[in-house]
Image (cartoon, helix red, strand yellow):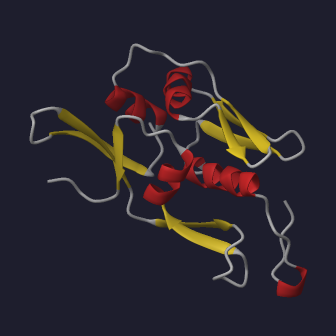
Amino acid sequence: MEQTNDITGARLASPWAIYARKCMKLFELDDEVEVKYDNDASSLTLLVSNAVKADALAQIMPVEMQFGNVTLDIAVVPANDTCTVEQIWRLAFEGNPVLVGTDVEKAPDGSPVIFALFAPECVQYLADDIGNPFGIQTRTYEQVARDVLVAGEMRITSNALD
C-alpha cells in the first residue's frame, strides 16, 4: 500500500484496503493479535497467539466482507460456543487497551443489555477522505469497532455507563 503526501500523486485506496487498515488500527496495541492483509488475494488474516482470544475473535469478526464485486475473505481460528457474549468480548480484547471494559445493564423490560466500552480516543489511518489533503481519516475506536466487528447482541459505545 503506497502512500504519498503530494496531492497530485495521491493514490486512491480500495474500500477493502481501508477496511484492512481499520482492522490493523483496532488491534495494533494488542501484542497477541497480528493483522495481515494480502491485497492480491483479497484476504485479511488475524493471527492470534492466545487460543481463547482467537476463539472469541472468531465469533465477532465477519468471515467475509463484500465490496461491490470484490469479496474480502477474513480468517480467524474457529469459535468457542461455550462463552457468554460478554466473556467473548472480554477475551477478544484481553490485553488490548482500546476496550476499557464491558457492562451488563437492565432494559426497562428487565432484559439484559450488554455494552462494550471502548476508549474515547481517536485513531488515524490512510483512507480516501477528501476532507483531508493527505488522505487521512480520523475516527474513534468506537466508530472503527462499529465498522469492523459484528456486534450481534453487544452494544458498542465509548460513553461511560452509570
Judging depth in this view, the residue of 151 and 139 nearest the camera is 151
Taking 54 as reference, is 16 left or right?
A: right
Locate residue 1: give its quadrant.
Answer: bottom right
In this rendering, position of residue 89 left or right of residue 14 = left
The answer to whether residue 25 of the structure is visible from this angle is yes
149 up-or-down from 133: above or below? above
> Which part of the image, by quadrant, shows the C terminus?
bottom left
Give the residue drawn at x 75%, y 49%: 68
How many dots with numbers? 0
Find the residue positioned furthest to the top: 82
Looking at the image, can residue 44 be seen? no
Picture coordinates of residue 12, whole percent (x, y): 82, 69
Return the residue nearer the eye: 14 or 119.
14
Provide residue 58's location: percent of width, then percent of height.
Answer: 56, 27
Vertical arrangement, residue 17 with respect to residue 87, above or below: below
Left or right, 90 with respect to 43, comes to left
Q: Residue at x 60, y 55 (%)?
A: 25
Q: Residue furthest front?
A: 68
Q: Is residue 36 above or below residue 143?
A: above
- Which residue shows up at 59% across the image and 34% down it? 62
Residue 17 image-quadrant placement: bottom right
Q: Position of residue 133 (x, y in %)?
A: 72, 85
Q: Is residue 143 left or right of residue 11?
A: left
